[in-house]
Amino acid sequence: MEVIILQVITVILVFAVLVIVHELGHFTVAKSLGIWVYEFSLGFGPAIWKRKKGETQYSVRAFPLGGFVSVAGMDEIADEEKGEVVPLERRYTSKPAWAKIATIAAGPLMNIVFAIVVSAIIVGVSGRLIPIVGKPMPGSSAEMVGLKGGDEIWAVDNLPIYNQGQFIQLIASSQDESIKLKVKREHEFLEFVVTPKFYEELGRPIIGVDELTYKEVPLGFFGVIKGGWDNTRIMVVTLFRGLRAMITGKVEADVAGPVGMVQMIGETASVMEEDFLIGLLNVLYLAVFLSVNFAILNLLPVPVLDGGWILLILIELIRGKPLTEKQKAIAQMTGLAFIAGLFLFATYSDFSRLGWLDNILEK
């Protein structure tokens, strides 16, 4: 029972923090640009606490998964109720295009900043571990290009390696395309171009290095900050590689929906019962992963997402005049249909992956 409670609390906290960080980005930039903010809320549903400071109401609501920012000129319901007190120049709709784009883009950008900061904390605690080749597997790609036992692998495709997971992740995401390795042999750095091969037993591409050990590299303050940046870059690169592989048909389209994400967070949190620090670091790493995914997803040029709003602003700039309400409505309905379809597909993938779909069909 205690494990379940821990998992539930962790799931709520991770989702709440990611959304709050995102909304805090919109809120901070809107305020700095003089846009009137009606409300900043933690959670949804009925308010259980609220306090007004200046023009903005701050509230905590009953359902803690997420939050929202209500901005003058973007919240139709709030505009009808309170819009008459807002000066025209304080409305989002009255701001220049660059200010609108900055306000919208601030949400995903804040998720990236969050990922960098938390990644730096992880690197600061866990350090940097460089993979050392024990021996190349006979007939493998590693053996063919001349990798030897004792070689230290410092980077893959110019992305510095900090742990075993990143090394495996970057090779697996290559999808059989050539990658560049930065290798330290004795006191010299060398470059090798190697093409991973798909290994059925593991279900992913490998270069064929066996008996890996790891060497810890000391990091100063700036090294830790760089580690946060590098870790976030690796996640962005592997995410785009995965999307490209799905679009080109190299791998089967498979995305995690809300059920899958809850399961991942819950399983990761359960490790804390055995080793709290390792479990906590794993949860933080997963939070970084989800934050990067949340940022990239929100930047897709789909109306109703942040990237869609930015796209509409750019279209208006090119046209030299605003879109009509009808055109905006059509764009938003198209975006909603896309998101609904993606949500259904992701949920279907979750059910299939967990075996729930088979159980339902059997009944």
Image (cartoon, rainbow, N blue to C red):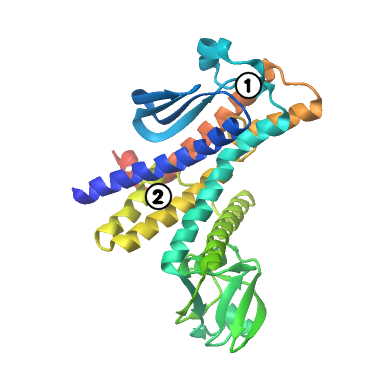
Q: Are marks 2 and 1 in contact (CB under 8 Å)?
A: no
What label sits on residue 52 in the rendered view? Answer: none
Name the residue rendered at 59%, 58% in the picture: 233
Q: Is residue 199 above or below residue 288?
A: below
Q: Nearer the viewer, residue 250 or 116?
A: 116
Q: Quadrant of residue 357?
A: top left
Q: Which residue is mark 2?
A: 353
Left or right of 15 on screen, residue 234: right
Instruction: Give the residue type at disc 1.
Output: Arg
Residue farthest toward the left in the current orientation of the protein: 1
Can residue 167 be spotted in the picture? yes
Name the residue rendered at 53%, 45% in the picture: 111
| Mark found first going from the N terminus, 2 or 1 | 1
Q: Residue 249 in the image: x percent, y percent?
A: 61, 52
| Distance Cα–Cα, label 2 vs label 1 | 48 Å
Residue farthest toward the front in the current orientation of the protein: 54
Q: Residue 25 in the image: x percent, y percent?
A: 54, 38
Q: Is residue 350 above or below residue 62?
A: below
At label 2, counting other C-alpha atoms closer than 10 Å, the crowd grade (few under 14, some 14-19, many 20 or more) is some
Q: Nearer the viewer, residue 341 or 329?
A: 329
Q: Is residue 304 above or below residue 173?
A: above
Q: Residue 176 in the image: x percent, y percent?
A: 61, 66
Q: Nearer the viewer, residue 8 or 35?
A: 35
Left or right of 139 on screen, residue 267: left
Left or right of 360 on screen, residue 86: right
Q: Which residue is mark 1?
A: 90
